[in-house]
Amino acid sequence: MKTFRKKDFPVAQVRRYLEPGPIVLLSSHWKDRSNIMTMGWHMMMEFSPSLFGCIIAEGNHSFEMIRRSKECVINLPTTALTDEVVGIGNCSGADVDKFDIFGLTALPANQVQAPLIKECYANFECRLFDASRIKRYNLFIWEIVKAHVASSPAVPETLHYMGNGEFMVAGDTISRRKKFKPEYL
Amino acid sequence: MKTFRKKDFPVAQVRRYLEPGPIVLLSSHWKDRSNIMTMGWHMMMEFSPSLFGCIIAEGNHSFEMIRRSKECVINLPTTALTDEVVGIGNCSGADVDKFDIFGLTALPANQVQAPLIKECYANFECRLFDASRIKRYNLFIWEIVKAHVASSPAVPETLHYMGNGEFMVAGDTISRRKKFKPEYL
């Protein structure tokens, strides 16, 4: 399976990969077990500290793992992993080892116990920053403490979930940089 | 300028248009003035009630307008409005009437005072649902109370902001519907 050569990336700039709204794979670790879930409800919340919010329904096996461990990794898959993204979202870590059945490689992270998924374009290590709205909204607010991003391609071909089993695939990139005020870039 | 013929759309299904992560135009109205801002930090939070979260920095002219009016409309532009999206994000409603200078049409909404932008593919009327995290995170949690969506095309060519003046443009749509468990669609 395709893998990427990655390098450290500034955590204050991860909006480049997360603001476009890709589906992501959230990996977790708790009591000697690792798990992966597919997630589409997320947003950037702050540049520095690098805050990232997401909604994780209680029914997910990952919910208690991340609530207890207070850590996760947000992994960015490309279209090369379309079938894995769908498969991971349609089974439960209560029943299967998803790294095993989907043939994905768990690499050790630097700052958290949750594993990096080697086959993803980027990996963002997260520590729970604010748990106060988990109960009411299933809202987890994370601080991204370490980012690993592939050196190439410059723009990943990400998947964007529309519901109903359909995805929009990232298309062309266009620049309007010259029309921006420098302070708004 | 291109406009769309729209029809009512179920508010519990708006994730189809918002989960893929497009840049949106937020319109507001307060004390006889309307305004528009460009926004990229947002996510779905619940199907029913239809909850939508977004981050709006205090520096925006729209911030006080929406905090006071407790209403807004989330408008979904396509690539036909690329220059307007950039222009709206690079000037302030404190200085200019954005509907006027960008040649956009304000239509009355059904449930809120904020106007619909006629030239957008979809319009989602919102009422403020939870203001408790505005102060700490600039987080507005909205209930989408009415949705208007174009009848065609089936999939809008949306813009997805990457920072640095660059946008990813929505590409192809692919379906993996047959690989989903019915309850996960």
Image: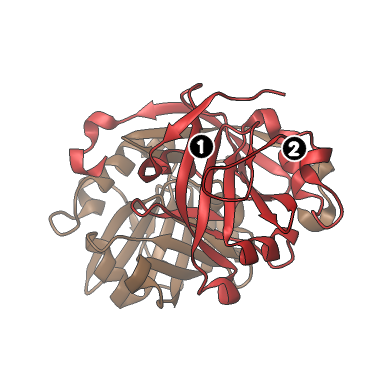
Chain colours: A brown, B red
Other-residue count near label 1 (Cα within 10 Å), few / some / many at <14 / 14–19 / ≥20: some
Residue at the location (55% across, 39% down)? B123
Q: Are marks 2 and 1 in contact (CB under 8 Å)?
A: no
Q: Chain of mark 2?
A: B
Q: Does residue A154 appear in the picture of this structure? A: no
Q: Is B121 in front, or is B65? A: B65
Mark 1: which secondary structure? loop
> In the picture shown, does residue A25 fall above or below B180?
below
Q: Position of residue A88 (x, y in %)?
A: 27, 47
Q: Are marks 2 and 1 on the same chain?
A: no
- Amino acid type at circle 2 is Glu
Q: Position of residue A74 (x, y in %)?
A: 43, 58
- Residue corresponding to mark 2: B84
Residue B33 percent coordinates (x, y): 75, 53
Q: Which mark is residue A157?
A: 1
Name which residue lies at 50% across and 21% down. Answer: B152
Quick one: quadrant of the N terminus of chain B? top right
Does the image show residue A135?
A: yes
Report the side of A79 relative to A92 (left or right).
Answer: right
Establish if B59 lies above or below B173: below
Kindly give the residue lying farthest to the right in the view shown: B95
The quarter of the displayed image where residue A173 is located: top right
In this rendered view, identify the residue nearer to me: A7 or B149. Answer: B149
